[in-house]
Amino acid sequence: MSQPIDVDLDLIRKYDVPGPRYTSYPTAPHFRDDIESDQVLTAIRANNEQARPLSLYFHIPFCQTLCWYCGCTTVIGKNPSWTESYLQALEQEMRRKSQWLHDDRQVVQIHFGGGTPTYLEPKEIRRIGRSIEENFNLSENIEFSVEVDPRRVTREHVEALRDAGFNRASLGVQDNNPRVQEAVNRIQPFEMTERVAGWLREAQFRSLNIDLIYGLPHQTVKSFDKTLSEVLTLQPDRFAIYTYAHVPWIKPAQKLLEGDALPGPEQKLAMQKHIVERLTGEGYDYIGMDHYARRDDELARARRNGTLRRNFQGYSTAAGVDIYGFGMSSISQIEGLYLQNPKDHQGYLEAVQKEDFPIHRAYLLSEEDELRRRWIMSLMCHARLEFSEMSRVLGVDIADHLSEELAQLRSMEEDGLVEIDEQGITVTDRGRLLLRNICMPFDAYIESGEGRYSRTV
Ligand code: SF4
């Protein structure tokens, strides 16, 4: 049985500060624009000396209309010529990058995110599926997932996705309440979501994830609970329920949401408490950082077995995997290197004509970065940092190396978020709701203050 989690509101309130989400370490704002392409190519070459498993990420940036809360990298509007040039660029990028790969590398995961991947027409989806097959060696058990916007998908799209090899889908819902939907410029009656979920089940998609957001205008615990009850009838395997990240200094359209209707921190906290308690009570395991999965789902099993991993798409079951990104703004993550493609549409189209690995920003990890990444990811994924194991693997005395960080964690220990002993650090159930705060002392680049990160609650 899943263990329902009790949420202590006073504690969560105390730790509500701006902080990174640690989908990478160092986090993306620390990527640099002075990394030379030959440094990148040397790292790529070294990465292909072994046949490590691969994960591919494709960014399809187009959306017909903008949802006011959106924090993604998008191109908004309806222009059929965009997709043709973009598909050509993706095909070019696949041809160029695949030449660098060790012959025996197998792709075990593919994810299409956006934007709106289903902005593509069914024939375009089949075409990109064929290009992927031509360029890569796909594992038989591949996890092939796609973000689906129920407002922009037909039964033909779902059939095309299945024919192209997709077997997992994530439905963008956010909230079913018409008043909230109107306030955020995203009209999507629940019946529409229900219909698309039915098509995906008919097409034998193996896994269905629902994305929701709390902290949007007009939401209350009661209204959000109604949304939860409705989407639970779809029996999703997983949920990703994000707190709305209000960052108008990066996304100016979010200013449209400011005003009385936007829930304050207390209301958001109450919603967070309700979501955790309701879903864990309904048989979902809390995976960490906004993610929930049915107890028999691979993600929940990976958490229990200690094989959970974290990357730019959230939590993942694939260990020892490198990610190669395709499309504008996509991020590749390989041993010792992060690499981001150009973030603007035109810049991306031009760069893929010239370079095998176009660079907007990149980061080469130092030895110290590698250590800190390991500690942070261990806490994010396993809620545990084992000193002896880490000291042995890394060849340093961890307890000694971390004396300052451990001193910073003492107040969290007093608050019952972590337990520290000679063996290591264990995050408690209370602490699992505040993982980013627990990781922040290990982040050598953390900068306090508003304006850089969204708040942790
Ligand atoms: S559909 Fe998704 S990516 Fe597009 S604007 Fe809305 S939230 Fe952003």
Image (cartoon, rainbow, N blue to C red):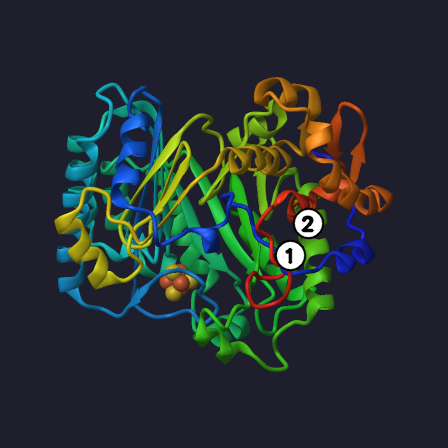
Amino acid under label 1? Thr
Q: Earlier in the sequence, mark 1 or mark 2?
A: 2
Q: Which quadrant of the figure shows ligand 1?
A: bottom left
Residue 21: where, in percent of width, then height?
56, 50
Image position of 237 with respect to 303: above or below: below
Residue 401 lies left or right of residue 31; in this view the side is: right
Disc 1 to disc 2: CB gap under 8 Å: yes
Amino acid under label 2? Asn
Report the Cα–Cα distance between label 1 and label 2: 7 Å
Location of the N terminus (image quadrant): top right
Circle 2 — which element? helix
- How dense is the environment of label 2, judged by Cα within 10 Å: few (below 14), some, or many (20 and up)? many
Residue 15 lies left or right of residue 286; in this view the side is: right
Occupied quadrant, residue 42: top left
Task: Identify which residue is drawn at 14% across, 44% down.
Answer: 92
Residue 331 visible in this rendered orientation of the protein: no
Task: In this rendered view, identify the residue nearer to me: 230 or 62.
Answer: 62
Image position of 350 with respect to 199: above or below: below
Residue 369 visible in this rendered orientation of the protein: yes
Residue 105 lies left or right of residue 86; in this view the side is: right
Judging by the rendered image, the residue that carries numbered circle 1 is 456
Task: Identify which residue is drawn at 53% across, 62% down.
Answer: 175
Residue 129: where, in percent of width, then height?
21, 39
Residue 231: where, in percent of width, then height?
54, 52
Task: In this rendered view, identify the residue nearer to me: 14 or 157.
Answer: 14
Image position of 218 with respect to 53: above or below: below
Task: Identify which residue is drawn at 47% across, 26% down.
Answer: 319
Judging by the rendered image, the residue that carries numbered circle 2 is 437
Location of the C terminus (image quadrant): bottom right
